[in-house]
């Protein structure tokens, strides 16, 4: 769902583009879906489990409340990095 990010506790998750091509495989300790929660951008990939997974759900409200407590400069840097990453992915052939 668009209002959540996920931390993988056990198992594996493939991140796929709209064509179904596997962009990455994530495992325990990795997070996905966080960029859309940080910048309210459109999700550009789909997550598919490859094995039985246990996920820790991070609601949008929980992440945003923690980000409000960040030093303003750290918050700005985080937003800039997400924006640069999104634009670098768009510019890729």
Image (spheres, grey):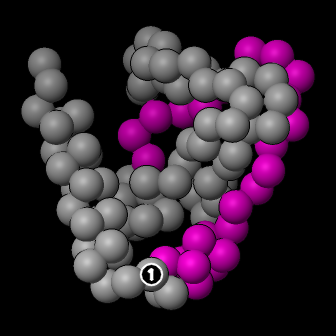
| Among the 4 quarters of the image, the one containing residue 38 | bottom left
The percent position of residue 83, horizontal first and vertical second, equals 23, 56
Position of 78 with respect to 54 (left or right) is: left
The percent position of residue 4, horizontal first and vertical second, equals 64, 59
Looking at the rendered structure, the secondary structure element under dot 1 is loop
In the rendered image, the vertical position of residue 63 relative to residue 11, given as above or below: below
Q: How many marks?
A: 1
Q: Residue at x 45, y 57 (%)?
A: 36
Q: Residues within 10 Å of mark 1 (few under 14, many from 20)?
A: few
Q: Residue at x 70, y 61 (%)?
A: 58
Q: Is residue 50 magenta?
A: yes
Q: Residue at x 18, y 50 (%)?
A: 84
Query: 63 or 75: nearer the eye?
Result: 75
Q: Which residue is mark 1?
A: 70
Residue extent of the magenta highlight: 43-67
| Among the 4 quarters of the image, the one containing residue 93 | top left
| Among the 4 quarters of the image, the one containing residue 8 | top right
In the rendered image, the vertical position of residue 14 relative to residue 69, given as above or below: above
In the rendered image, the vertical position of residue 21 relative to residue 13, given as above or below: above
The percent position of residue 60, horizontal first and vertical second, equals 61, 70
Position of 24 with respect to 3 (left or right) is: left
Position of 24 with respect to 76 (left or right) is: right
Q: Tell me, yes or no, if residue 20 can be seen here.
A: no
Q: Is residue 80 magenta?
A: no
């Amino acid at each position: 769902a668009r209002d959540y990010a996920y931390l993988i506790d056990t198992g594996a998750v493939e991140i796929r583009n709209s064509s179904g091509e596997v962009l990455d495989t994530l495992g325990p300790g990795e997070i996905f879906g966080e960029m859309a929660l940080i910048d309210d951008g459109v999700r550009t990939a789909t997550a598919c489990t490859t094995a039985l997974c246990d996920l820790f759900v991070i609601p949008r409200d929980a992440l945003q409340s923690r980000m409000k407590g960040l030093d303003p400069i750290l918050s700005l840097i985080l937003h800039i990095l997400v924006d640069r990453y999104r634009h670098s992915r768009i510019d890729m052939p």
